[in-house]
């Protein structure tokens, strides 16, 4: 399963950074998209929003105010699901995703991994 982290950061205090490390520790493949270039365990943070193949899950670490510019990009990745982590919940975008047949979860990626429900 490949997970696309939207809002990736090299700041160890950020939950996106913690999620990237936890996903890798649990054996998941990740791709990172963020505002600033950087690297997490040999995985580059990409800033130009390329298209990827075989994205199973998008996990959101961008607040709803900054999401509209990302709607088309995220939907174009055709993920199986989008996880809206605490603080990223967005009913309008969630409805758009569900209309395209994408599963939506308001949950914490770190908690899902910790309890074996990812």
Image (tube, rainbow, N blue to C red):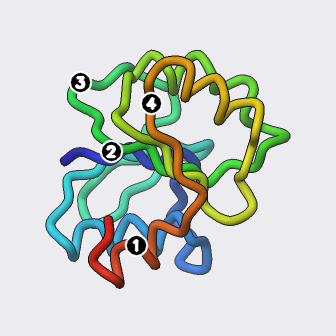
Residue at image mark 2: 31
Which residue is at a point 57% across and 71% down the rendered structure image? 15
Question: Do the residues under discs 2 and 4 have CB atoms within 8 angstroms?
Answer: no
- How many other residues sit within 10 Å of disc 4, few (<14), some (14-19) or many (≥20)? some
Residue at image mark 3: 53
Q: Residue furthest left?
A: 27
Residue at image mark 1: 112
Helix, strand or loop at label 4? It is loop
Residue 37 visible, this orientation = no
Residue at image mark 4: 102
Q: Give how far apart the Cα atoms at labels 3 and 4 are.
A: 16 Å
Task: Work out whether residue 36 or residue 73 is closer to the camera in this orientation and state it.
Answer: 73
Helix, strand or loop at label 1? It is helix
Q: Give how far apart the Cα atoms at labels 2 and 3 are.
A: 11 Å
Q: Earlier in the sequence, mark 2 or mark 1?
A: 2
Closer to viewer: mark 3 or mark 4: 4
Q: Which of marks 3 and 4 is nearer the N terminus?
A: 3
Can you give x and y, in whole percent of width and height, for residue 109 in the image? 46, 66
Which residue is at a point 43% across and 69% down the rendered structure image? 19
């Amino acid at each position: 399963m490949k997970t696309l982290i939207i809002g990736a950061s090299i700041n160890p205090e950020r939950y996106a950074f913690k999620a990237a490390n936890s996903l890798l520790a649990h054996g998941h493949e990740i791709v990172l998209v963020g505002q600033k270039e950087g690297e997490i365990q040999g995985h580059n943070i990409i800033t130009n929003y390329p298209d990827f193949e075989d994205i199973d899950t998008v996990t959101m670490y961008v607040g709803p105010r900054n999401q509209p510019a990302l709607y088309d990009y995220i939907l174009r990745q055709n993920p199986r699901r989008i996880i809206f982590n605490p603080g990223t919940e967005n009913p309008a975008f969630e409805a758009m995703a569900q209309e395209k047949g994408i599963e939506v979860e308001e949950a914490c990626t770190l908690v899902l991994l910790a309890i074996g429900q990812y």
